Amino acid sequence: MYADLYSAVISGIRAEIVRVEIDISNGLPGFSIVGLAGKTVRESAKRVRSAVVNSGFHWPMKKITVNLAPGDVQKYGSHFDLAIAVCLLICSKQINIKNKSKYLFAGELTLNGDINRVKGILPMLLEAKNKGIKKAVIPLENAAECNLVQNTEITFLQNLKEIDNLNNIKGSKTKIKNNTLRLNRNKIPDINSIRGQKTAKKAVMIAAAGRHNLLLVGPPGCGKTMLAHSIVKLLPLLNKEELIEVASIYSIKDKLRDLDINNRYRPFVAPHHSITSAGLIGGGKIPVPGEISLAHKGVLFLDELPEFKNKVLSNLREPLENKKIKIVRQQASFIFPADFQLITAMNPCPCGYAGLDDNRCSCSERDIARYQKKLSGALKDRIDLQIELLPLKSDDILKKNTEQQYNYLKKIEQAVLAQKDRYKDLNISYNSQLSIENIEKFCPLDSDAENILKQAVENLQLSMRGYIRLLRVARTTADLNKNKNIKSNDLLEAVNLRWYAEKSEMLL
């Protein structure tokens, strides 16, 4: 007796359709799985047997062979349980499913037959749809992420015994409302609620408008973390394609609850400084996406930047330039998307009070130099905006926020529209994506700005990368000021926001 149906396996951030085949023949009773099955798949034998028996079905006392095709693709994951169990029941003629070749099955079985949620359901459904498989049977606990898949009939099961009525169940594709997918955005500060720090607020606005990387340097309590978090409400919302791409990554990591699908806010990822390289960029025996991929199309925030290991920070260079990370293993290579906006924050010294007039700093010059040296020049050169914050004065702390709110969002929206219109014939959307070939075409300067740029290159000893990033920031400031060409004020503002204020005084 023979039967087959379809499931899927995650490879990188995408899924690959797998055909599950079962043959039941006479011989010594046994259960074997072939087809490059990993440990988690081989363990399914005992789960499937207990689930089948405890759901009211009988277990064939014959030789049972399971094949997972194609045989040259590594299979892993407990989600094959449901497909194997259903295929076994079909093969032993205990159930009959019409048009079973049009279904995708995925779910983990417990010993009593209940079906648990699994990782990666969203990319599995998307790949099945691309392959013409437009029906699916998945765990009820995975229902919330299915709203992003259109034109697919999905049946949600809680227990294996419900499979007996599958032909009588009308495929359900209704909007599942789940409050766990809606983050509490009241915890995200509004930039207008932050007191003082006008220069830093302007830097955050420019960063949001042009998707520029940002470094905030200042003593504890000056508002660095709040400023970084406030950018979430300033960024454009995810469009449909971006939302599906980002949600697929979160589905693979089983962290879809951390993504605000309903409001389409961009992800904001803030890993602790103790994170490993594999945790940040991805990895493992079977590579999975890291934190930089969870920040894809959103923000990666690294607080207390010098506390991160140098090896971890050095891994950011490739994704910052290429917007992706490649991880090579013996069996295959994996490419994970990493188109994130980097926002970082740090103290000026180990105690955090260097440079203040109140002599609170207890660090020696050697300690300060060693601390700041942890941020390599190569990484620092890739950060477009570098801002120095000072402690709030007593007037700023005590002053009630009664002044008229500045409409940051409106200015950012008009700047974003200007960029998309300008680059409509290119495969980019923001000034931060401008290549060296397009800098001169899209960043014209007036005569005064050209003189300032020449002084900046000479006096600040700009590298080629620094020159490009300076013009990218200047282009964004010009867009915010509604200037077609980059004027002297736009360029001066870009210089002041890319280097500490005392360095930009060299141009005056």
Image (cartoon, rainbow, N blue to C red):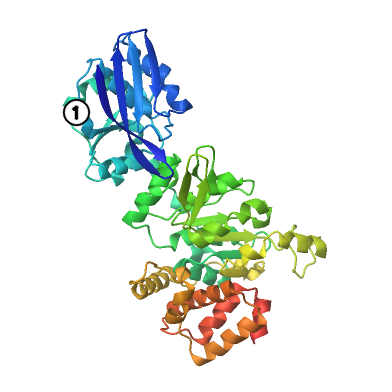
In the image, 136 versus 180, the foreground residue is 136
Residue depicted at x 38% and y 46%: 248
Residue depicted at x 44% and y 44%: 12
Residue depicted at x 37% and y 57%: 238
Horizontally, residue 9 falls left or right of residue 357, namely: left
- The answer to whether residue 300 is above or below residue 354 is above
- Say which amino acid is labelled 1: Ile
Please identify the quarter of the rendering in which residue 237 is found. bottom left
Q: Position of residue 126 (x, y in %)?
A: 30, 44
In the image, 101 versus 442, the foreground residue is 101
Residue located beneath label 1 in the image: 169
Mark 1: few/some/many CA within 10 Å (<14, 14-19, 20+): few
* Residue 371 in view of the camera: yes
The number of numbered discs placed on residues in the rendered structure image is 1
* Residue 182 in view of the camera: no
Task: Find numbered disc 1 in the image and state the secondary structure of the residue it sits on.
Answer: loop
In the image, 138 versus 207, the foreground residue is 138
Q: Position of residue 148 (x, y in %)?
A: 30, 46
Q: Position of residue 127 (x, y in %)?
A: 31, 43
Please identify the quarter of the rendering in which residue 55 is found. top left
Horizontally, residue 62 falls left or right of residue 318, namely: left
Q: Position of residue 67 (x, y in %)?
A: 35, 25
Horizontally, residue 308 falls left or right of residue 180, namely: right
- The answer to whether residue 438 is above or below residue 96 is below
In the image, 29 versus 337, the foreground residue is 29
Point out the image quarter for the C terminus.
bottom right
Q: Residue furthest bottom?
A: 447
Residue depicted at x 33% and y 23%: 84
